[in-house]
């Protein structure tokens, strides 16, 4: 994609060239394409590939590889974690806690559970998007079974304090699920030392392929999920289906690369984010969604007064950015996440999410800044004054 | 999945509107509704529209439609404005139906413009 | 995999080199890696790729592309079809029909539905594996909502008469689901003219990548499924999650290749199957599981009297074959499918499934025949006579 | 997933058993149980086992274990047979626990062989 400036890494990232090369080898008919459930030589070799990839992912998270279950992506991981754990523990209680600013895969799963008769408390964030911990403490009840709070928000980049949230959950004997789709491979996650019971991952947000994700399930009493799918006995019956070995191997390599260059990636992204924000913060009427602290620097979400969002988005072409969450962008409703931060419809609609990463260059950012400034200027000139 | 929401025509009209701006020495009308703002202005002489201009605060489809309207009526008889219907423009530009509401604001503006031009020449 | 003879195509096939090449292009960081839900240029290009791949799959099945929903594979498709349709129609009735010789993804989903309170009739096959149609006619009741019968059996290759079965279902107003994981791309499936309501596919059994499948859902009144997963609005909410564009494009190309060379593939496979069967049918005590008619020739499943199955399997190395269903092969229980055909435990345990396809050569088959004959001979010499 | 169910030792013993076959001029015993058949034979002289042979109908682990047993006792004292326990062989060959039942049939056969050899030499 040489003719566009791709700044939509939060929707999906390019595949790292080293990962792409591994995929190429594994998709080759002379490569190992066997089913890792098969007992023959080729099957056992495939199983060994899966095993070492799993070890890499476990290393990235500092967790027991036996706690990892492969899925098709974070959507499935979120569903399996939330619906699976809620149903598994339903006999103990039916109260659950989450936030309206979670990803749709979390929000909609909780809504489905509400229809099943679960009782969900929706904790609204502060105006910067963060959870006020005391509100969580007040909300947890004796029958609370599960709390689900994401790590890095996909629209604003805000980072929740999962260590503190998890400590409270553990104290009150509720399971804690973290959607880490946006943070895994980018921020350190040390599961041996974090009070997290369930954690969702997806490879395509960390330079791996689309179509593969994982759910980490801690080995603790009471921490189990009911499966959503039934079939062959793969993955201890928690998630059946032929294991997609090339995708898993690629996920494993992506994890190992992420671990090796996490600090470097983060420095790179922070420098780009800084440059971008410095470039557009001076534009009249610009406002940051979320705050400058506690933020993953690879996502910058800005609204602007009195510029129409959809036109701004088109004016930015060929710079590729998102308005709301990518998963949501067909529908031009104002983002529910930004509304929850207290933005009015107009401001929410003018929001542009820039997101970038390992392959983004300083020139890409310069182009984006230029396009943003020019687009705003042109659209403002095009618009009649506001009615008095 | 996102089929392209913008036809080639919409992109072209949005990116290079030849009639953007207000004609300060012409007749101007304005409609604010449906969360959008549409301003049209025209210079008329001998029943003909010699120049048109627009300003819009709204989505790309609305901007493109306003540009298309200006281009279409330039050189035409002013009284045609009052019979204007957006349906044809929506079809030509392939504007999605859910945008009908906003485009109707443009329709209202075009007709107001027609009335305003007629009012002015009646005066004269 | 040049050091093995891979005859386990029913477990998974190699990726066609042309498909592998397409995957390579799409996984390249300069390729189009965007999220097809995004409204920016890159997203729209990705959406166009998905659209044309979907058109190819629809062409292979002669169906409306809008009826196709992508999943992670046939396991998920089977679950979505069966649990989804049963739950959607539960208010009309709770009776369902299937066979014990279905794949585990079907069998275990029906078992889960039984635990939910559905009433499942399990129709046992004739000794050749086929369903006696009159037994189906007798089993269908007024409250029967769904019948699920696979097209080609993954262990024996037996082909069920889905046209006749479907006609009965339609007549009695029950939905008809077909697991076509083994037949799609290999046998003609004309959905415009077949009375099939739901059909499961997976790419990795037809020279596409692992990790992508589809469910076809006919556009008929009453033919709907409740989703198993919740999230972003992708795929009309039936199955959310970021669409894995490279996998989908590869699936599309695999479908288009399959359609173009179906007759050629089938001739090739039939010739190989013939050669294999002629090579081993003369071995003392060999018996075919299933029958010689109504069989997909790419799967040959044979039992043998008085040879232990696990040892035979190891003696065949480096010829890679399966004992039972690949999905099942960790567990050395005698195959439930072969038991249902009336084989005793010993005979079932001695079963070897040879399966092969597009890339299999005459030499591969010759090696397998030789290995089978030699293995049987050696193991028989190694064994003491049967007790009198 | 399938970790390799066969250790290198098992593969080697299975593929090239040096003691396969029945020693027709020796003492033979046989056990049929757990769906497997194990036959062991030995030639003994002066309390020593000078040759051993086996025939097995069973899984690769059992075949390998039988071969390992024959190799191990060759040249050893016959009375050691009666104290034989499979546990050590299962560990060395990394035989999965679920196969214990079948391997115990081999243990029984080894001990029967010990008794049979002792019986024969008591007679002599
Ligand atoms: C925070 C978060 N959770 C879940 C998802 C869903 O991930 P996937 O598309 O892999 O199902 C996404 C991305 O779309 C995300 O950003
Ligand atoms: C008949 C049949 N149905 C379903 C499946 C499951 O397919 P997948 O591994 O793609 O989930 C298989 C293969 O394992 C199969 O052979």
Image (cartoon, coloured by chain):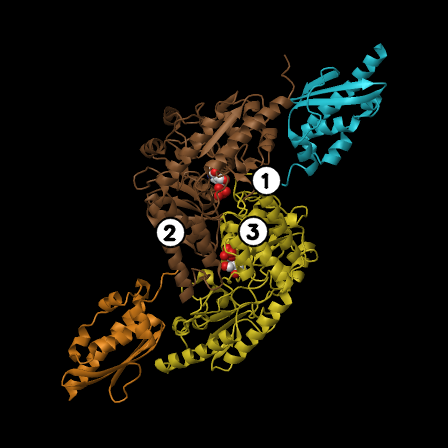
Chain colours: A brown, B cyan, C yellow, D orange
Image vertical order of residue D20 relative to residue C103, above or below: below
Residue C16 appears at what percent x and percent y? Answer: 54, 61
Residue pictured at 71% horizontal, 29% vertical: B65
* Chain ID, mark 1: C
Q: Are marks 3 and 2 on the same chain?
A: no
Secondary element under disc 2, as helix, strand or loop, is helix
Secondary element under disc 1, as helix, strand or loop, is helix
* Chain ID, mark 3: C
Q: Which residue is mark 1?
A: C41
Residue D20 appears at what percent x and percent y? Answer: 30, 81
Residue pictured at 40% horizontal, 32% vertical: A159
- Contact between marks 3 and 2 (CB within 8 A): the answer is no
The label on residue C56 is: none
Q: Is residue C206 visible?
A: no
Residue C7 appears at what percent x and percent y? Answer: 48, 69
Q: Which residue is mark 3?
A: C248
Disc nearest the viewer among 3 and 1: 1
Residue B53 appears at what percent x and percent y? Answer: 72, 22
The label on residue A54 is: 2
Q: Are marks 3 and 1 on the same chain?
A: yes
Using the numbered discs, state the Cα–Cα distance from disc 3 to disc 1 in whole angstroms: 19 Å
Q: Residues within 10 Å of mark 1 (few under 14, many from 20)?
A: many
Using the numbered discs, state the Cα–Cα distance from disc 3 to disc 2 in whole angstroms: 25 Å
* Chain ID, mark 2: A
- Residue sitting nearer the eye, C285 or A192: A192
């Amino acid at each position: 994609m040489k003719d566009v400036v791709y700044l939509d890494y939060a929707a999906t990232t390019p595949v790292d060239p080293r990962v792409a090369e591994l995929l190429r080898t594994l998709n080759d008919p002379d490569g190992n394409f066997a089913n890792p459930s098969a007992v023959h030589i080729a099957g056992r070799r495939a199983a060994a590939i899966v095993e070492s990839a799993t070890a890499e992912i476990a290393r990235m998270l500092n967790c027991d590889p036996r706690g990892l279950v492969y899925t098709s992506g974070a959507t499935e991981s979120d569903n399996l974690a939330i619906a699976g754990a809620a149903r598994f523990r339903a006999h103990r209680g039916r109260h659950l806690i989450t936030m309206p600013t979670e990803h749709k895969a979390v929000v909609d799963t909780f809504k489905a559970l509400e229809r099943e008769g679960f009782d969900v408390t929706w904790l609204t964030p502060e105006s910067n998007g963060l959870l006020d911990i005391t509100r969580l403490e007040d909300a947890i009840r004796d029958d609370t079974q599960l709390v689900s709070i994401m790590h890095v928000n996909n629209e604003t980049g805000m980072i929740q304090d999962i260590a503190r949230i998890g400590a409270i959950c553990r104290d009150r004997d509720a399971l804690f699920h973290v959607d880490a789709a946006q943070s895994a491979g980018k921020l350190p996650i040390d599961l041996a030392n974090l009070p997290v019971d369930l954690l969702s991952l997806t490879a395509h947000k960390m330079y791996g392929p689309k179509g593969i994700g994982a759910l980490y399930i801690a080995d603790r009493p009471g921490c189990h999920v009911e499966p959503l799918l039934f079939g062959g006995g793969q993955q201890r019956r928690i998630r059946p289906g032929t294991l997609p070995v090339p995708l898993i191997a690629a996920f494993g390599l992506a994890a190992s690369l992420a671990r090796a260059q996490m600090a470097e990636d983060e420095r790179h992204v922070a420098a780009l984010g800084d440059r971008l924000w410095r470039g557009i913060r001076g534009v009249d009427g610009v406002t940051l969604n979320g705050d400058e602290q506690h933020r993953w620097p690879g996502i910058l979400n800005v609204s602007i007064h009195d510029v129409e969002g959809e036109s701004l988005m088109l004016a930015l072409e060929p710079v590729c950015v998102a308005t709301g969450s990518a998963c949501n962008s067909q529908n031009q409703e104002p983002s529910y996440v930004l509304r929850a931060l207290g933005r009015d419809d107009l401001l929410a609609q003018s929001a542009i999410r820039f997101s970038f990463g390992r392959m983004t260059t300083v020139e890409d950012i310069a182009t984006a800044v230029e396009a943003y400034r020019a687009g705003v200027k042109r659209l403002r000139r095009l618009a009649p004054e506001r009615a008095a | 999945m996102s089929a392209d929401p913008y036809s080639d025509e919409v992109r072209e009209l949005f990116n290079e509107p030849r009639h953007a701006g207000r004609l300060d020495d012409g007749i101007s009308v304005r409609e604010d509704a449906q969360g959008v703002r549409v301003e049209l202005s025209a210079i008329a002489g001998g029943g003909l529209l010699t120049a048109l201009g627009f300003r819009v605060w709204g989505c790309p489809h609305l901007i493109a439609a306003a540009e298309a309207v200006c281009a279409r009526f330039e050189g035409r008889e002013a009284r045609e404005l009052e019979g204007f219907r957006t349906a044809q423009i929506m079809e030509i530009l392939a504007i999605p139906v859910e945008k009908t509401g906003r485009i109707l604001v443009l329709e209202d503006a075009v007709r107001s413009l027609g009335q305003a031009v007629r009012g002015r020449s009646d005066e004269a």
